[in-house]
């Protein structure tokens, strides 16, 4: 009779093993992130908008660890003395909620009509749709309930509307829970994301910058849905054309537009994969590092500066810490504060002082293309001014 691992054979002297089992990696990471956030500070949920911004700047370890730990960056920026006006106004939130309620009224009849007209005109018209109850305890429970509802709707056929489902996405070793406005299951079993925004669609077109931001946000939901679909057999199709619903011509009437997010999905997936894993960043921080906003400003500044940042002007519209990072970038005289495209053109020249010195011929290798271009530009400028 074979013995299983840990059994004791007859005649041996058994000694009880009093060594406690080692904590799992996930529990250890959660404990470490709670220490960084502060023992009594609740975690701030990482939403799709933050994930899209994080994917747009994957080289910023500071944002990665703060978002992964659930730190409230707005409170942190205020404690550092560099508050920002980042975020929506209360009026815009109220207006957006009222518009979303109108779009989803009557069991989502108008929303399903727009989905049918813009995304799936060949399917049977949605005379009615199932709207499953997705309530559950905690984000993990809601995520499991959403996955179950998606599986049941795919097998049942017909139209199904999932109102504010909960999805989970692994981001650099930390789990992010995402809540799209709606997900629609088509009669053929395919899944589509619906994004409802309060900015207007005038004459069938909306602000391209705002549409681009909505597409990047929807691409995050598509990635999360694909992970859910991959666990089913057969794997249902997650459509890469999402429905964007906005007010028509400044009214409260909804208008829909199909947006192809294949490019945004590919870029987001690639950038998220490039992110340094959260536990690796946390392992480089000094013992006792904490980002709790009630800590002294000097201590908070030292904690934030212990994590390298990758500031760029685009951060001003996507990150609450942008003003603080911009001040530090100016103090360090780095060229990244002038924009990523310029930084990419300057090669090994990392500060403005180095750039000016190379342009004047004081320093730099003349064989360096960046140095040669700077000196040529400086000569042209001097000739024009003369």
Image (cartoon, grey):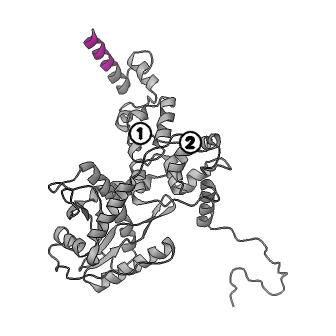
For the record, the magenta segment spans 375-385
Helix, strand or loop status at disc 2: loop
Q: Residue at x 37, y 58 (%)?
A: 93
Residue 178 shown left or right of residue 2 in the figure: left
- Please tell me whether residue 18 is drawn above or below residue 222 in the rendered image: below
Judge left or right: residue 126 versus residue 300: left
Residue that appears at 27% across and 48% down: 209
Question: Which corner quadrant of the image does residue 306 belong to?
Answer: top right
Magenta span has 381?
Answer: yes
Pointer 2 local density, CA inside 10 Å: few below 14, some 14–19, many at least 20 = many
Percent position of residue 263, x then y: 28, 55
Tell me, yes or no, whether the highlighted magenta stretch contains residue 262: no
What residue is disc 2 on? 80
Nearer to us in this view, 77 or 318? 77
Disc 2 to disc 1, C-alpha distance? 19 Å
Q: Quadrant of the C terminus?
A: top left
Whether residue 219 is visible, yes or no, is no
Query: Residue 349 at x, y = what percent?
Result: 43, 28
Question: What residue sits 54% from the left and 54% below the top?
Answer: 71
Q: Secondary structure at mark 1?
A: loop
Front disc: 2 or 1: 2
Rendered view: 302 above or below 375:
below
Is residue 278 rendered to the left or right of residue 99? right
Precedes in sequence: disc 2 or disc 1: 2
Circles 2 and 1, Cβ within 8 Å, touching? The answer is no
Q: Check disc 1 and report the residue beneath it.
A: 312
């Amino acid at each position: 009779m074979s013995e299983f691992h840990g059994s004791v054979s007859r005649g041996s002297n058994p000694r009880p093993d009093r060594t406690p089992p080692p904590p799992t990696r996930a529990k250890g990471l959660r404990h470490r992130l709670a220490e960084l956030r502060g023992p009594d500070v609740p975690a701030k949920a990482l939403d799709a908008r933050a994930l899209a911004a994080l994917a747009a700047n994957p080289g910023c370890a500071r944002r990665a660890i703060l978002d992964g730990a659930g730190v409230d960056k707005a409170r942190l920026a205020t404690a550092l003395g560099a508050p920002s006006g980042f975020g929506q106004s209360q009026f815009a939130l109220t207006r957006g909620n009222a518009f979303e309620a109108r779009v989803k009224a009557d069991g989502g009849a108008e929303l399903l009509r727009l989905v049918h007209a813009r995304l799936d005109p060949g399917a049977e018209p949605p005379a009615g749709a199932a709207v499953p109850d997705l309530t559950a305890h905690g984000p993990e429970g809601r995520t499991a309930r959403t996955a179950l509802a998606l599986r049941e709707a795919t097998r049942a056929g017909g139209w199904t509307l999932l109102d504010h489902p909960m999805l989970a996405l692994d981001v650099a070793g930390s789990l992010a829970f995402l809540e799209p406005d709606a997900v629609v299951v088509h009669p053929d079993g395919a899944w589509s994301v619906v994004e409802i925004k309060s900015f207007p669609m005038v004459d069938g077109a909306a602000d391209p910058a705002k549409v681009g931001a909505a597409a990047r946000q929807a691409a995050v939901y598509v990635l999360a849905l694909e992970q859910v679909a991959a666990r089913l057999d057969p794997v249902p199709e997650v459509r890469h054309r999402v429905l964007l619903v906005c007010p028509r011509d400044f009214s409260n009437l909804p208008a829909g537009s199909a947006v192809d997010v294949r490019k945004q999905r590919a870029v987001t997936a690639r950038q998220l994969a490039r992110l340094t894993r959260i536990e690796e960043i946390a392992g480089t921080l000094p013992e006792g590092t904490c980002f709790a906003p009630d800590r002294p400003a000097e201590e908070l500044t030292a904690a934030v500066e212990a994590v390298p940042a990758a500031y760029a002007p685009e951060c001003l519209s996507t990150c609450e810490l942008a003003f603080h990072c911009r001040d530090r970038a100016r103090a360090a005289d780095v060229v990244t504060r002038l924009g990523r495209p310029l930084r990419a053109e300057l090669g090994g020249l990392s500060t403005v002082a180095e750039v000016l010195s190379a342009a004047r011929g004081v320093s730099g290798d003349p064989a360096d293309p960046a140095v040669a271009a700077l000196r040529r530009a400086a000569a042209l400028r001097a000739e024009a001014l003369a």
